[in-house]
Amino acid sequence: MSYVSTPTVVLGTNSFEDCESVLALGELPLLSFLVEDGVLRVTLEVPSPPATIPVAVHANISRDNTVRVTTGSRDVTVHAGSHVVLMAKLVAGNDHLVEVDAFDLRPIGLTVRADAKGLYVGRSVMSRNVIRGSKIGIRLG
């Protein structure tokens, strides 16, 4: 029997606790994380349009050869062409906490990114928020 959980995700300076999807485009989940038996599983779905390069990654598996996924024992990186669009890892010693080290959808045509100061959506900045127990953490569009 496998053990699956929805981890707490730190994106920028924001924390998403017990959220099925961290980000969504309308009703379409855009970014979500699961931990299955200590393995981080990332789903990143960005259709075209609005993206100029569609991304379809489900549980670390890309459905398109223009998007590449690399995995380590506790980390996942998603590449669109030569660009890293997502880099996330399970925190050492804690299978319920994911840190997103890199998140930048600008190379695929969306003005959504995160850094050490916050989550940027267009010209808006979200910083130091805790979103808890929501089906969708942040809905775009």
Image (cartoon, helix red, strand yellow):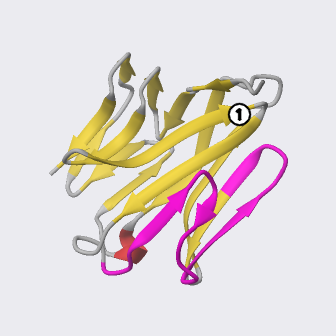
Where residue 116 appears, as percent x and y from the top left, is 51, 44
What residue would you read off at disc 1? 36
The answer to whether residue 53 is magenta is: yes
**Residue type highlighted by circle 1:** Glu
Residue at horizontal 37 percent and vertical 45 percent from the top: 119
In the image, residue 90 above or below residue 114: above
| Res 69 quadrant in image | bottom right
The answer to whether residue 55 is magenta is: yes
Badge 1 marks a residue whose secondary structure is strand
Residue at horizontal 53 percent and vertical 32 percent from the top: 9
Magenta span of residues: 52-76
Residue at horizontal 54 percent and vertical 83 percent from the top: 66
| Res 22 quadrant in image | top left
Where residue 58 appears, as percent x and y from the top left, is 54, 55
Direction top: furthest residue: 133
- Identify which residue, 14 or 94, lies in the foreground: 94
Using a 10 Å C-alpha cutoff, classify the residue at mark 1 as few (fewer than 14 neighbours), some (14 to 19) or many (20 or more). some
Q: Does residue 132 appear to the left or right of 6 in the view shown?
A: left
